[in-house]
Amino acid sequence: MSLRRLLMHSPIAVATLWIVVYLLFALFPLLVLLLHPLPSGRGFWTEFSVALGFIGLALMALQFVLTARVNRIEASYGIDILLQFHRYTAMVAFVMVLVHPVILFIVQPETLQLLNFFQAPWRARMAVLAMLAFLAMVVTTIWRKQLKIPYEPWRASHSILAVLAVGLGFGHAIGVGNYLGLFWKAMLWSGIMLISLWLIIYVRLVKPWLMTKKPYIVEAVYPQRGDVWTLALRPLGHAGFTFQPGQFAWLTLNITPLSMREHPFSMSSSGDRADRIEFGIKAIGDFTKRIKDYKPGTKAYLDGPYGVFTIDRYWDTAGFVLIAGGVGITPIFSILLSAAERKDDRPFLLIYAAATWDDVTYRENLEELKQALDLKIVYVLRKAQDDWEGETGYVDQALLEKYIPLHRGTRQYFICAAPVMMDAVERALFELNVPITNIHMEHFNLA
Ligand SMILES: Cc1cc2nc3c(=O)[nH]c(=O)nc-3n(C[C@H](O)[C@H](O)[C@H](O)COP(=O)(O)OP(=O)(O)OC[C@H]3O[C@@H](n4cnc5c(N)ncnc54)[C@H](O)[C@@H]3O)c2cc1C
């Protein structure tokens, strides 16, 4: 099979290719730096420390690609896996950048005086400031909730600190000049830095500006069971977009997208209807509690669709097991609605956990969908009323074993729920010999 055909037919091959590209980009600048002419007469540890610094800087620059919502990359992994990777590689970069001066301090103790901020040359001051920016980023990200930093100020400061850390880090490398003394090497690194800067300008300014050209208006807002509100949007002066059911979009309401105060929500309507896009939004915080107050006619903006939590990627699978907890039903509801409209005749099993019978969002609509689909629904209530004859408690291994088909590998499993439930269900499915590649999860808590 040719490489092109392989890439067209195998998502795993595409995902692997992205990893190879990533590694090349992470290591390429270092390989170029090692080309002639090399600084002479420096020991192994000094060179090793410099190499760590450069790879750390390249990894930091690559973070801008990981978070730029590049659709092609995102489509191979899903946003939660990309963000996990972003977190892990940022930590790796942080450790490298931190170890880089520590080695120098050990092998060349005289370099310790560069820590004297007021007397040190600018190149050393830039290194210290870059390190402080990086440290602030790591601390405010890991302990954001403990430090009580609201999501939006955190996100804005995260971008500013990232630009500072990378810019100052690069300034330090140019200032030291040992490896970047040659014009073309300095140009190569400048190119990498400019691409990173462009990506952040594109994501924060250009893309939001393009979104202002494609507004939506609120067509309706109405309540559902479980403290969830349906927000229905209509495209204004353009065609809107279709999507793969289960995907999500970033929503901005009643303010310009340039303000960057957007929130991710899964579409809950049919993926094939571009003229009316609906969301099911649970009132849990500052933004979501205000959804009910927005009036028809309010302007809205969408950036999407994104995500890989969709049955459209598994057209040749025999059927689906969908497992939802609370508001995690929204992407799954879209999957079922779209399947009904497309007259999909494969079996669907929905295991749906909610607090009480009254909290079962879209209950009536789901029951209706049974007419159009081969759909079995198992409701699992945490607090059931006295006359409830269905399942109670939690979705555990015993419950799953009772309902999922014996030939486990013939189905794809989609889970969207609170993190604790998703972890427990994933473990239970694994114990029940469901192949790990058949399990797909959507996390609502990105940050
Ligand atoms: C892929 C995806 C799909 C989602 N789909 C739905 C859905 O269909 N229905 C639904 O009700 N909720 C959904 N969510 C969750 C929803 O985005 C958050 O509940 C909402 O952004 C909370 O905002 P808030 O200001 O009301 O709450 P806050 O009290 O400010 O935040 C509560 C928590 O939500 C997260 N959060 C807040 N703002 C953002 C933001 N701008 N971007 C990312 N995370 C944020 C943070 O972890 C925060 O700690 C989804 C989340 C993701 C990542």
Image: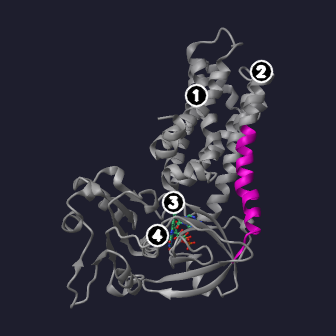
Q: Which residues are magenta?
A: 193-216
Which amino acid type is marked by label 3? Leu
Q: Earlier in the sequence, mark 2 or mark 1?
A: 1
Is disc 4 in contact with disc 2, using a CB cutoff of under 8 Å? no
Residue at position x 58%, y 24% in the image: 49
Residue at position x 58%, y 86% in the image: 221
**Residue position marked by numbered label 4 in the rendering:** 331
**Residue position marked by numbered label 2 in the rendering:** 181
404 on left or right of 412: left
**Is 86 included in the stretch rendered in magenta?**
no
Q: Between tags 1 and 3, which lies in front?
A: 3
Q: Between tags 3 and 4, which lies in front?
A: 4
**Residue position marked by numbered label 1 in the rendering:** 52
Residue 402 in view of the camera: yes
Circle number at residue 446? 3
**Is 205 included in the stretch rendered in magenta?**
yes
Chief secondary structure of the magenta span?
A: helix
Q: Secondary structure at mark 2?
A: loop
Q: Earlier in the sequence, mark 4 or mark 1?
A: 1
Label 1 – label 3 distance at C-alpha: 29 Å
Q: Between tags 4 and 2, which lies in front?
A: 4
From the top left corner, tell me how far across and down residue 174 is, in percent.
Answer: 76, 28
